[in-house]
């Protein structure tokens, strides 16, 4: 399973907390794109795809959601619910997001620009690719 949860260093004092993410330092790739997901709906699922050639770090900046991670052989479910934990997902990993809390905000750092052609959106096609 090419995913891991990364505990990020928090700079905190009486004013609040701060986390810094830097490419090839505490983020294990060059950051080429950042996007964020907000105004999510608890009953609506997102994701349901894999990437042939993309690495990502996902942070639940606010709120929580459940991630299903699948490498074609094993399927695991984790909760992403802390702004100081990043979920790293490597290449060729099927992911689904669901059970978003109200107001959940996800920030995603990606190793490449948006390239629709490198998505695998069909689960059977994904299984053939990793089999
Ligand atoms: P989608 O892949 O459905 O999001 P999720 O992974 O959360 O299920 O993307 C929603 C829309 O946003 C879709 O029309 C493609 C577009 N999009 C971009 O234009 N650039 C991006 O970097 C991303 C991630 C999506």
Image (cartoon, helix red, strand yellow):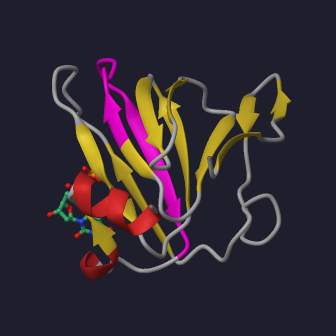
Q: Quadrant of the C terminus?
A: bottom left
Q: Position of residue 61 (x, y in %)?
A: 52, 36
Left or right for 11, reference 127: right
The residue positioned 69% from the left and 33% from the top of the image is: 84
Instruction: Tell me how many marks there are.
Output: 0
Left or right for 18, reference 88: right
Ligand 1 sits in which quadrant? bottom left
89 and 40: which is toward the camera: 89
Q: Position of residue 8 (x, y in %)?
A: 78, 41
Most extreme residue toward the front is 131
Dividing the picture into quadrants, the one containing residue 85 is: top right
107 and 79: which is toward the camera: 79
Q: Position of residue 130 (x, y in %)?
A: 45, 63
Left or right for 43, reference 110: left
Residue 106 magenta? yes
The residue positioned 29% from the left and 66% from the top of the image is: 120
Give the magenta part as a residue range.
Answer: 96-111
Left or right for 112, reference 57: left
Is 55 situated above or below 58? Answer: below
């Amino acid at each position: 399973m090419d995913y891991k949860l990364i505990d990020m260093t928090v700079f905190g004092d009486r004013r609040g907390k701060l986390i810094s993410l830097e490419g090839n330092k505490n983020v294990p790739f060059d950051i080429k794109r950042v996007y964020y997901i907000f105004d999510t709906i608890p009953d609506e699922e997102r994701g349901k795809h894999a990437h042939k050639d993309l690495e990502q770090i996902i942070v639940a900046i606010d709120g929580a959601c459940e991630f299903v991670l699948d490498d074609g052989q094993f399927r695991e479910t984790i909760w992403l619910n802390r702004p100081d934990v990043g979920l790293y997902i490597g290449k060729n990993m099927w992911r689904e997001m669901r059970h978003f809390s109200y107001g959940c905000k996800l920030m995603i750092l990606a190793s490449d620009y948006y390239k629709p052609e490198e998505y695998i959106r069909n689960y059977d096609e994904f299984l053939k690719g990793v089999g």
